[in-house]
Image (cartoon, rainbow, N blue to C red):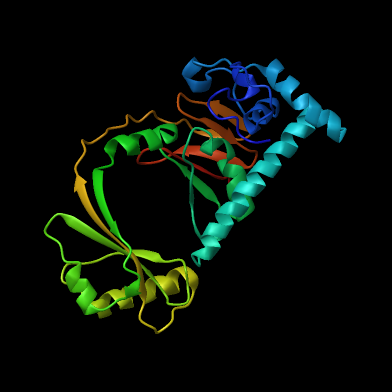
Amino acid sequence: PESAGGRPGPACFGLGGRAATPTDAALIAGRLAADGFAGGAIKLDRAAAEAALAPIAGGLGIDLAAAATAILDLAETLLAEATRLVAVRRGLDPRRLGLVALGGAGPLHAAGIAARLGIERVLIPARPGLGAAAGLLAAPIEIDTIDSPMQLLDNRSMARWADGAGVERIVTLSEPDRVDGLDLTIGANETAAALAARFREACRRQFGHAGDASPMVLRLRRVERIASPQVAIDDLPFPSREGPAAMARADCAIWIPSGWRLRPSPGQGAWLERAR
């Protein structure tokens, strides 16, 4: 099943949704704590979730619990493979990285995704469900001017792009035989040769190789930023908990599988990690 969005939302929200969603499956599977969901603002309706999953379970000839588990397994496998693809394209081994769980449902699926990627622990920020909203409020306002010169990088073009103070220049460079590019910020008084060298190093990091030809300029952005006020997010402490356990917080839901544990981070947030 696919997400039903905020409206009508999952069937278990009681807002008119009828189609089964991963949230309904998580409730049936016991991974969502029905009490305290969204700070108590939403009372999850298990009967509605069961009615939504019934056609799927009946079609597969399995019970509701098995259907719910299958839905969650498929969803987390697809998320893990998408994450693996992004990492591999950048020349990174997911097993050597940590995972950050953002969003209201991020901590609900994080352990399952991490396990499929061979990742041992997940960082849950202090308020994962508020991250996007806080970022939107705190992000500076930008005034962009975009050019698409489609030319080889050289010092003459660099000189023509000179701007006054307070303007950031971001150039999208590509190897001549590629259609995708990488964004680099042009440093003050940087030469074309220095910028090309940084581009080749970035290509080696992300793609595993780099050519010797002069890079092609696909796009140039001139960005002027207007500062925004600082946004503070209060820290709601996390408890220590051994899995299996479902937790509901005001801004997110957390699932701690068997063999995993949740422990407060020395800073803000918490670590969800394999028990040792």
Q: Is residue 210 above or below residue 39?
A: below
Residue lying at 64% horizontally and 44% vertically, measured from the top left = 76
Which image quadrant for residue 32?
Answer: top right
Quadrant into which the N terminus falls? top right
Q: Residue at x 66, y 48 (%)?
A: 77
Q: Position of residue 200 (x, y in %)?
A: 38, 76
Q: Quadrant of residue 94?
A: bottom right
Near-viewer residue (164 or 231): 164
For residue 181, side relative to residue 80 (left or right): left
Residue 247's image quarter?
top right
At which x and y percent is residue 227? Answer: 19, 42
Extreme left residue here?
A: 165
Q: Position of residue 17 (x, y in %)?
A: 63, 21
Q: Position of residue 177 (x, y in %)?
A: 47, 77
Whether residue 144 sits left or right of residue 5 in the image: it is left
> 218 or 12: which is nearer to us?
218
Direction right: furthest residue: 61
Q: Residue at coordinates 48% horizontally, 38% vertically from top-left?
A: 263
Total numbered circles: 0
Look at the picture and state if 202 lies above or below 163: below
In the image, residue 132 above or below residue 35: below
Residue 126 in sight in this render: no
Q: Residue at x 37, y 74 (%)?
A: 216
Q: Is residue 183 visible?
A: yes
